[in-house]
Each structure stands twice: as C-alpha cells, then as structure tokens.
Image: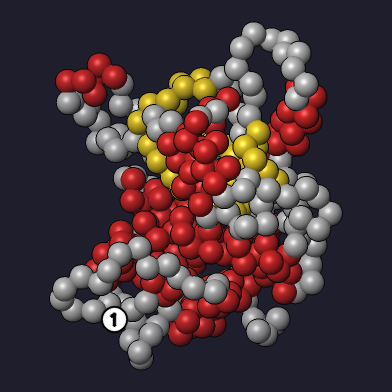
Amino acid sequence: MVQAEPHLVTLIKLVDEIPELPCVEKRKRGRPKTYSDRLMVKAVIVMIVRRLYTAHSLLAFLDEETELTQMLRHNLSEVGKFPNRRTWERRFEQLAPTLPSLIGTLGRYLIELLEPFAQTGRAVALDSTALRANGGVWHQKDRQQGVIPHTSIDSEAGWSKSGYHGWWYGWKLHLACTIGSLWLPLAACLTVANTNDSEKAIELVQELSNDVRYCLGDKHYRGADLAAYCRLTERILVTPRSGRYPHKDTGVEVRKFFHKLRSQAIEPFNALFKNIFEWRGQVPVKGLLSTQVFVLGAVLLYQLVLLYQFCMGKALGKNIKSFLRAA
C-alpha cells in the first residue's frame, strides 16, 4: 500500500483486504459472471464518496482525463476489460443481498484487528434509525386506492412512527454497533420503515463475532425468539423489563447501567453516520435495492475508513467526514 496515492484509490484497494465475499446463492445456469462482486463493491465505494448515484454518472466521471480517474479505471477493470453501463446497472441490483453478510465479514475481521473490547466490556448495541425516502410521501389514502399522485414518490418505501422522529415515510437502517470509545458497526441491514425491529434482530446477531457477550436493545427487542437465539449462541440479551415503573427487582440497576451505555453509543453513532453522508433529509436514490446498495455500502465504507486509519496509524474514528470529502 502506497501512502502517497489518492485516498479514494487506497480505499477501494482495501476491499481486497476483506477476508472473503459471501456467496448468497448457488450459481445459476447460463453464462458465468465476467466481473467479481468485489469489483462491484469497489465501484459503489467510488460512487458514494463522489456522490454519483447512477451508472451513467459513474462512467461520466471516469471519462474525465485526470490522474485520479485513470487510476480508478485501472482498479475498476478485470480480465483486461472495463464493464459497460448496462453491466454496472445489472450487477448493482444483484449486489444488494450480499452486503449484510459482507458488512458482517468485515466487522468480524475488524474485531480481531482493532480489539475494541480490550478496554471495554464485550457488548454491542442494537437499534434502527429512520431514513426518509427520496422524493415526496405516499399518503395512506392514496396508497389504499393504489394511486401515486406524483412521479417523485418512491412507492417501495413505507410509513412508520417513533417517539423521536414522529411519522416518517422511508426506510429503516438496522444496526449492531460496539459500545465504548470506538463506535464500530458490526452488522447492518435495510428494510422498509414499517418493519418491526425484532424481525431483523436475529439476522444482526448472526453476523456478530463470537467475542460479543452482551446484546443491548430497547423495548422493541424484547422478544422470546431473539432471547432464545442469544442463549443458544451464549450471549445475554439485555432489554428494558415490561410492566409499570419504577421496577424494584434485583436486576434493575444493572439494566439501567447497560441502557446508559447503549444510549451513549448507538444514538450518537446514528447521528454521526447521517451527518457524515448528509442523509438527515432524504436518501439520494429510489427503490429498495438501490437504497440498500448505497446505504449499506456507506456502512461498509465507514468500516473501510476505520481499516484505513488503523493501517496508517491514525486515530480511529476521528475526522471521517473531512477525510471522505478530501478523497
């Protein structure tokens, strides 16, 4: 790795450092893939950093004759060939289902490399955060009638409500993140907004490193299936207890302590993540698959930046937004 090369080139080269890329399905009949999934991930990283949200805009950017784009084209080529626009578009759609497993793979690798539990307890926080859909909102009265009143509306998104955000139309990003001084996302998936948090929680826990001992969640993660799965994998699920407050059982002080740790990690990380990629307003694309590619790709990019900082001996988790702006 050459430190003097552009940051963006170094970042996409780090994709090759990920131990493995998951295979989510058996190979179908027909012509085999010419280009690897790893190459598609590299292109998504370039698109997120440069805010290019279509294959056409990616190719237009790479057509510019600069030293950076020449290096990028070289690193986005395989078997002596560079994919055409239709290939990029088709393969981006196929990439979405692989990203949660890829984030989990890199998360487990970073646990071994960065050792975030060396100074803190082996706990992760589980949560979901709201992401508003691109364009207008599809009101329920129109939705029930099957009427889409404006072309800006993303009809694949959904409605949900939370105590903090109120009603919103869009998506949910489900996350598992370390607690302590380093906020490291270990697992992620993206769904429509009206998905119950507990439905995706087991998928998050399945991607966690065996080093994780405690899973901390709010009341939405208080479910028998998740608790049973945590016990099966020798983990402890800690959530608020049901019933009237104040609770007076012997475990109340322990739960308060864990809840404070959770709120000091996952909520600031959700805000930081949206701030870095400037998605406090709306996501930049439409459709479930496209939104999964770019939002989950951004989680993967955050992990890669931590890997870059570790390799370069820099402070972990610091100045990530300014680093990406300079890439």
Q: In the image, is residue 112 above or below residue 239?
A: below
Pick the residue in front: 49 or 253. 253
Query: Which residue, as the protein is rendered here, is positioned at the far bottom?
Result: 80
Pick the residue in front: 46 or 160. 160
Q: Quadrant of residue 256?
A: top right
The x and y percentages for residue 186 are: 59, 54
Q: Amino acid at mark 1?
A: Thr
Label 1 environment density (alpha carbons within 10 Å; few <14, some 14–19, many ≥20): few
Q: Quadrant of residue 175?
A: top right
Pick the residue in front: 120 or 59. 120
The x and y percentages for residue 295 are: 47, 50
Residue drawn 64% across the image and 21% down it: 241
18 left or right of 159? right
Q: Identify the residue under disc 1.
A: 34
Total marks drawn?
A: 1
Picture quarter with the N terminus = bottom right
Residue drawn 57% across the image and 64% down it: 106
Q: In the image, is residue 54 above or below residue 189?
A: below
Residue drawn 55% across the image and 36% down it: 227
106 left or right of 288? right
- Residue 290 shows in this picture: yes
Residue drawn 62% across the image and 48% down it: 234
185 left or right of 290? right
The x and y percentages for residue 273 are: 61, 46
Query: Which residue, as the protein is rendered here, is positioned at the far right?
Result: 119
Pick the residue in front: 189 or 295. 189
Picture quarter with the C terminus = bottom right
Q: In the image, is residue 125 above or below residue 166?
A: below
293 left or right of 213? left
The x and y percentages for residue 69 are: 49, 78
Residue at disc 1, secondary structure: loop
Q: In the image, is residue 216 above or below residue 85?
A: above
